[in-house]
Image: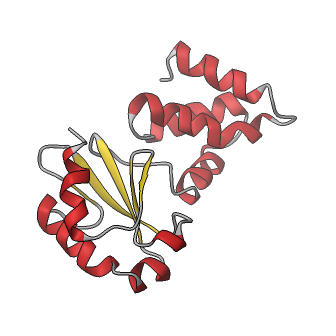
């Protein structure tokens, strides 16, 4: 069930569109900001609020790679897996990251601190390899920089 605060924010966004469904991504981001991810009940609730079917909302949620459809850690690491990042040294960086965190792609650390997920492109090919932690973009990476960056996320 969506809180009154979430409903109010979604209604505010929906009012800016000719069709309420135009606020679908915004609504999903609002839910995720408050809860950390978007569960099945939230998909149904957003659908009802925006006059859409749950399948339509789920299609948007699963297409848009910044919407998380399962529980994640406190910090989400989106590692760019584009060709540019691979060519510029993603492989040793990813191996170091997996070893340091003790997890692979799609997994969450035992302490719930980090979730590591692939992201096809972060749009910073001129500074590859790159990843995002939450909303923070980190570029021109190498294994030595990773430990210092990770230490900033408690």
Q: Residue at x 21, y 53 (%)?
A: 148
- Position of 60 relative to 19 (above/below): below
Q: Quadrant of residue 25?
A: top right
Left/right placement of residue 9 relative to residue 124 reads right
**Residue visible at 60% across and 20% down in the picture:** 7
Image location (x, y in percent) of residue 111: 12, 44
Colour mapping used in the image: secondary structure
Residue at 28% across / 66% down in the picture?
Answer: 105
Task: Name the residue at 74% across, 29% down.
Answer: 14
Quadrant position of the C terminus in the picture: top left
> Residue pushed farthest bottom?
87
Q: Position of residue 130 (x, y in %)?
A: 41, 65
* 139 to the left or right of 94: right
Q: Number of marks in the image?
A: 0
**Which sits in the foreground, 124 or 34?**
124
Residue at the outermost right position: 18
Q: Is residue 24 left or right of residue 132?
A: right
- Is 40 or 83 nearer to us in this picture? 83
The furthest residue to the top: 4
Query: Where residue 136 sits: x, y (%)?
Result: 42, 47
Q: Give residue 102's quadrant in the image.
A: bottom left
Q: Is residue 52 visible?
A: yes
Residue 3 in the image: above or below residue 105: above
Residue 51 percent coordinates (x, y)? 73, 34
Residue 120 visible to the viewer: no
Q: Is residue 11 above or below residue 61?
A: above
């Amino acid at each position: 069930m969506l809180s009154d605060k979430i409903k109010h924010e979604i209604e505010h966004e929906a009012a800016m569109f000719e069709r309420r469904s135009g606020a679908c991504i915004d609504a999903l981001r609002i839910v995720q900001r408050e809860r950390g991810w978007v569960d099945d009940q939230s998909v149904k609730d957003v659908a009802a609020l925006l006059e859409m079917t749950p399948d339509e909302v789920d299609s948007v949620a699963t297409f848009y790679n910044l919407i998380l459809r399962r529980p994640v850690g406190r910090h989400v690491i989106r590692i760019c897996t584009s060709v540019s990042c691979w060519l510029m040294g993603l492989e040793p960086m990813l191996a170091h990251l997996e070893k340091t965190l003790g997890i692979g792609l799609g997994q969450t650390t035992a302490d719930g601190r980090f979730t590591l997920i692939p992201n096809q492109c972060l749009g910073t090919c001129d500074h590859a390899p790159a990843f995002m932690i939450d909303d923070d973009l980190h570029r021109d990476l190498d294994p030595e920089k990773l430990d210092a960056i990770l230490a900033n996320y408690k």
